[in-house]
Image (tube, rainbow, N blue to C red):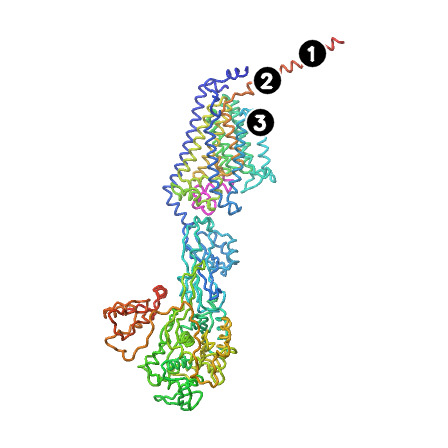
């Protein structure tokens, strides 16, 4: 009883807990929107992959059933995350960061990391391909939220509010570029910038990072024939149509030639091998091709609702860690979705980013759904039982200690008495 | 909780988050806007780019039907093969791809590179490639090089029946023979389907796969017996080689139905090896070539005379010791005798006797019989290039011509006509229309069309036919000219012939050019098959009995064996010894075949008195449909017409005065407009301009 009163007292007015009898206690619209994205993803995945799967593996639903299994695993992870108080991530931030870095180092070691399409990105975990980069995104957001919320008003300073974040994220990006994973690196830097901006870092510093990032990006691009080609293909897909611009030009053809109404579900032609990785990074292509403009409006609408609910959860969070965490995770999804759709429609050069919840990819959907679980947990606005009970817990400990001490003293007194 | 307490900080935080939200929302709208732009403004341009790489509508020809013999043995079948083509515009690296392709194709890398760099949209690399080549090229997996399935025509029997079956072009058009004649039935339909192609151009995902089979062509079942055909060709070949002849013909006919069991000629023709042959090789010479029949014609004369009762088998003629002058020319016999009976005239092939028999019958009557036996007109087999032969009308015969025509010179006929006329003697005097098609069946084996045996007309009475058979049987017994054609267990009714040929340069009969013939049927008492064999320009020997007789015997043996014909008991066989020919009894007529179609009008011979009757009906025969209609309309008659093309018969006959209630029936050939349209109009069939 005592703790309840304490909890009520510590809670700020206006940040009322949403536990008001009926209602699940967490943000239902977010859950619905995410489940709709996952379902749409499975449908489009089947449409996109069945032909190739049937041709290469003999079964048209191979990719679908694999992805459905992982989505199920992700939903399970989401339910677990829903039950774990998000504040634990704050308390365990350094172990999490440590494990993440260890995984990134591990995947960089030849022989352990599995190479696919020229990048060493996968760890083989009991037969499943596991991408540490997806975990790195979550870990980076947790670290940034923790660090920013801890520093509070000192965020304005360069050494305290700026350098540590840059250093940690820079280390992660460095490890990612070993794979290399340019897309995730860009994502990490982007999310960091957003979080720093929101937390009140000086714009001049952000500008500095932007400049630095631009220079680093330039070297990253010019140092790699492959990336240079991608930029050229982005600028003029048609003259590179037979090689590097093939994917993007076929994607544009598939989207454009379908017309506003789309070809109808299952009727797309892009999947006949024209658009490589159609079920993966280019799932947006088949949505636009088969479902037309309405399909894209639908997907974009779902992401907008996700953005809205995510930011709402951030605003409603009881502590600043929860707020930054919610904001960071939401931005992560929103940013990745925007960048993916920009790539698909030829507004950004290709870099290998999935459409969250929709694209094929096991780690991506499992970590993504787990992150949604975190968001939903934040939305519950549960009291920090652990934190609140700290006093009583410590008091109990103290009491135990005193009891021990007392017994000791008493026993010693008895000894003395008997002597 | 420090931040939370700071309302000012919280305000700016909200502003900054809001700002980011706005940027995100803007980006999302940009995506929607971009897709809208791509799908409206750019749609057309992008669609055009699509069209370059994807064929959506594909028109294909269904599988062509088979041609089979009377027992279902395949004579022509279509097999699936791959054809390889290239879309040069899609080839990224022509030089390299040419190098890769060259080992699999019979072309040099340079030639291929030229093809690959051409600005044509579509070039065949290899039509109907062998499977190994197709597989190898498919394995190269070159973008822009594609495979498609086509049908290749294959003739399992090779040269057997080659000219008859004919062949198709590489695109499956029937070009010659029955392939051409029945192209419409065999070809099947084309079907179009919406087909999607993957990035490599392979057809995929047939959105609504048609039931290909339903478009498949019909199969044509012939009356040919492949075994008899083979023996006929081989026997013919043997005689041609042995006698150093330039060619030969053989036709085997089922006498009851008019079924053509075999039609062979040399040189042989293998439609599988078209390139090894010249156009002369694939002519079906049995219908396209005409010969002067020579002495094999004598049985028709005798049969006509017997039918007209102007002679009997035992009537004796003065054969003038084998020499007789006719109109300034001398005709002679090989066997010189002072006199012969009619039977002996057949047996020993007397020209003088024949002339005398003909003279007694009269020119016009004889001519009418010649026409009635089917000479000088198409047989109705309806094969391209069929020649009607030439028989001049009797008013243009000089006396020597009359004599010549009496023993088969001075007129021309195709081997098929001779076979059909011979079969008429065997068929109790009834001429049948040659029947080459038994049935046309659809892909499920259901009969869609059946050619019924068709009777053209009765030419002579059964009695006259039987007496002629008896006389012809004398030819193959000792003393006759055709003993080489005799069979061990059967009586063979036959007639040999050694016809003189006109030298095309001198336009006169050449003493060194001959056509040796042997026509006949067996068993003579109850005939089943009629066979004619002609060897053209034999060099080693010349008498028909020697040159053509052995081939006749081989073919007859095979044909009778194939049909399971049993030898007749001795009491039913002709007594050819001293029995007076008069005593030949007409045995029980063999059962007529079922389904015989009798042409609705029967030919009745012209009454000499009514030839130019001014009040009677005109002779519509040989008029085109239009001519006949115009003519009858002028007479105020609306005729009932039966068929298309030319009038072959009319009822009532010319010269008849048409009563008020009578109607005029004209029978035309070909029978159907369908068969009429199937052929390009030839001189015999055109609905011509007047």
Does B451 sit above or below residue B554? above
* Disc 3 target residue: A94
Q: How far, Cα to Cα, is label 1 from label 3?
A: 40 Å
Q: Which residue is mark 2?
A: A393
The mark closer to the camera, 3 or 2, is 2
Of labels 1 and 3, earlier in sequence is 3
Q: Which residues are magenta?
A: A221-250
Q: Read off the chain for label 3.
A: A
Whole-percent x and y of residue B628?
28, 70
- Quarter of the figure that contains the C terminus of chain A: top right
Q: Is residue B4 above or below residue B127?
A: above
A408 w.r.t. A136: above or below: above
Count every numbered label the image shows and give the total: 3
In the picture, measured across the screen, residue B604 lies left or right of residue B443, that is: left
Give the alpha-carbon distance from disc 2 to disc 1, as whole Å: 24 Å
Question: Chain for mark 1?
Answer: A
**A16 in relation to B213, above or below:** above
**What x and y, as percent, mark residue B428?**
41, 76
* Badge 2: residue crowd in 10 Å (few <14, some 14–19, many ≥20): few
Q: Which mark is residue A409?
A: 1
Q: Is residue B676 left or right of residue A172?
A: left
Question: Regarding mark 2 in the picture, which secondary structure is present there?
Answer: helix
In this view, the residue in front, B496 or A126, is B496
* Dots 2 and 1 on the same chain: yes
Q: Is residue A237 magenta?
A: yes
Rounded to the nearest whole Å, what is the CA distance between mark 3 and mark 2?
24 Å
């Amino acid at each position: 009883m005592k703790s309840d009163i304490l909890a009520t007292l510590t809670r700020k007015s206006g940040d009322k807990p949403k536990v008001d009898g009926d209602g699940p206690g967490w943000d239902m619209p977010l859950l619905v929107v995410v489940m709709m994205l996952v379902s749409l993803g499975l449908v489009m995945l089947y449409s996109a992959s069945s032909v190739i799967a049937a041709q290469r593996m003999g079964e048209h639903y191979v990719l679908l059933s694999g992805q459905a299994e992982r989505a199920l695993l992700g939903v399970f992870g989401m339910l677990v995350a829903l039950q774990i108080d998000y504040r634990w991530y704050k308390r365990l931030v350094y172990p999490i960061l440590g494990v993440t870095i260890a995984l990134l180092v591990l995947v960089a070691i030849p022989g352990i990391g599995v190479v696919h399409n020229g990048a060493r990105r996968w760890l083989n975990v009991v037969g499943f391909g596991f991408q540490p980069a997806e975990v790195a995104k979550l870990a980076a957001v947790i670290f940034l939220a923790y660090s920013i919320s801890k520093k509070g008003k000192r965020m304005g300073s360069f050494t305290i509010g700026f350098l540590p974040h840059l250093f940690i994220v820079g280390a992660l990006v460095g490890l990612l570029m070993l794979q290399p994973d340019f897309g995730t690196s860009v994502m990490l830097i982007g999310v960091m910038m957003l979080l720093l901006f929101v937390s009140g870092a000086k714009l001049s510093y952000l500008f500095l990072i932007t400049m630095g990032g631009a220079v680093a990006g330039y070297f990253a691009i010019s140092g790699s024939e492959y990336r240079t080609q991608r930029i050229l293909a982005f600028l003029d897909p048609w003259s590179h149509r037979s090689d590097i611009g093939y994917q993007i030009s076929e994607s544009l053809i598939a989207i454009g030639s379908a017309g506003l109404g789309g070809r109808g579900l299952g009727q797309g032609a892009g999947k006949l091998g024209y658009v490589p990785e159609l079920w993966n990074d280019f799932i947006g292509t088949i949505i636009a091709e088969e479902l037309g403009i309405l399909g894209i409006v639908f997907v974009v609408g779902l992401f907008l609702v996700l953005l809205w609910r995510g930011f709402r959860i951030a605003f409603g969070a009881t502590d600043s860690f929860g707020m930054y965490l919610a904001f960071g995770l939401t931005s992560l999804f929103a940013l990745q979705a925007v960048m993916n759709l920009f790539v698909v429609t030829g507004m950004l050069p290709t870099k290998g980013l999935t459409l969250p919840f929709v694209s094929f990819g096991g780690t991506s959907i499992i970590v993504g759904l787990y992150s949604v679980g975190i968001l939903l947990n934040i939305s519950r606005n549960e009291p920090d039982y652990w934190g609140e009970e700290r006093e009583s817990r410590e008091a109990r400990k103290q009491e135990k200690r005193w009891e021990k001490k007392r017994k000791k003293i008493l026993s010693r007194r008895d000894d003395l008495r008997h002597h | 909780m420090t931040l939370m307490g700071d309302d000012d900080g919280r305000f700016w935080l909200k502003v900054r988050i809001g700002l980011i939200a706005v940027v995100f929302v803007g980006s999302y709208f940009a995506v929607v806007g971009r897709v809208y732009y791509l799908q409206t403004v750019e749609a057309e341009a992008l669609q055009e780019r699509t069209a370059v790489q994807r064929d959506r509508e594909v028109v294909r020809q269904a599988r062509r039907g088979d041609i089979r013999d009377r027992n279902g043995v395949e004579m022509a079948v279509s097999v699936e093969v791959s054809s390889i083509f290239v879309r040069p515009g899609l080839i990224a690296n022509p030089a390299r791809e040419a190098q890769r392709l060259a080992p699999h194709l019979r072309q040099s890398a340079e030639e291929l590179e030229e093809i690959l760099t051409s600005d044509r949209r579509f070039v065949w690399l290899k039509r109907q490639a062998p499977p190994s080549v197709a597989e190898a090229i498919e394995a190269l997996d070159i973008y822009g090089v594609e495979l498609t399935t086509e049908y290749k025509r294959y003739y399992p029997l090779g040269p057997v029946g080659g000219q008859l079956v004919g062949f198709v072009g590489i695109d499956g058009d029937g070009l010659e023979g029955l392939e051409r004649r029945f192209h419409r039935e065999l070809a099947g339909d084309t079907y179009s389907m919406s087909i999607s192609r993957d990035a490599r151009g392979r057809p995929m995902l047939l959105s609504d796969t048609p039931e290909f089979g339903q478009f498949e062509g019909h199969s044509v079942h012939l009356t040919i017996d492949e075994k008899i055909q083979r023996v006929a060709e081989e026997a013919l070949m043997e005689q041609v080689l042995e006698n150093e002849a330039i060619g030969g013909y053989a036709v085997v006919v089922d006498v009851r139905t008019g079924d053509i069991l075999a039609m062979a000629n040399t040189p042989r023709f293998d439609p599988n090896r078209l390139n090894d042959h010249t156009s002369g090789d694939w002519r079906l010479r049995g219908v396209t070539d005409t010969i002067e029949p020579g002495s094999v014609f004598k049985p028709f004369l005798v049969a006509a005379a017997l039918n007209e009762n102007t002679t009997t088998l035992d009537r004796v003629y003065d054969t003038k010791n084998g020499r007789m002058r006719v109109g300034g020319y001398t005709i002679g016999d090989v066997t010189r005798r002072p006199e012969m009976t009619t039977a002996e005239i057949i047996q020993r092939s007397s020209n003088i006797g024949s002339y005398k028999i003909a003279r007694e019958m009269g020119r016009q009557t004889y001519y009418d019989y010649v026409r009635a036996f089917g000479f000088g007109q198409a047989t109705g087999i309806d094969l391209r290039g069929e020649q009607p032969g030439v028989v001049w009308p009797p008013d243009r015969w000089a006396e020597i011509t009359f004599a010549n025509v009496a023993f088969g010179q001075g007129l021309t006929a195709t081997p098929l006509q001779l076979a059909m006329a011979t079969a008429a003697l065997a068929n109790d005097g009834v001429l049948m229309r040659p029947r080459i098609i038994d049935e046309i069946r659809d892909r499920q084996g259901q009969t869609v069309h059946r050619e019924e045996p068709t009777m053209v007309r009765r030419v002579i009475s059964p009695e006259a036919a039987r007496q002629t058979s008896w006389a012809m049987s004398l030819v193959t017994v000792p003393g006759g000219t055709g003993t080489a054609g005799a069979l061990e267990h059967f009586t063979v009714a036959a007639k040999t012939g050694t016809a003189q040929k006109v030298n095309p340069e001198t336009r006169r009969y050449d003493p060194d050019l001959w056509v040796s013939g042997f026509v006949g049927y067996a068993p003579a008492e109850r005939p089943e098959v009629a066979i004619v064999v002609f060897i053209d320009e034999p060099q080693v020997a010349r008498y028909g009995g020697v040159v053509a007789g052995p081939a006749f015997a081989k073919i007859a043996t095979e044909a009778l064996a194939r049909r399971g014909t049993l030898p007749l008991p001795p009491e039913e066989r002709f007594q050819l010894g001293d029995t007076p020919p008069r005593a030949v009894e007409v045995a029980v007529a063999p059962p007529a075949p079922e389904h015989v179609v009798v042409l609705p009008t029967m030919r009745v011979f012209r009454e000499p008195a009514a030839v130019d009757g001014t009040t009677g009906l005109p002779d519509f025969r040989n008029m085109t449909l239009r001519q006949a209609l115009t003519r009858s309309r002028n007479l105020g008659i609306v005729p009932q017409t039966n068929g298309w093309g030319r009038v072959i018969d009319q009822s009532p006959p010319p010269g008849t005065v048409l009563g008020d209630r009578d109607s005029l029936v004209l029978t035309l050939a070909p029978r159907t407009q369908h068969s009429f349209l199937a052929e390009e109009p030839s001189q015999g069939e055109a609905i011509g301009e007047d």
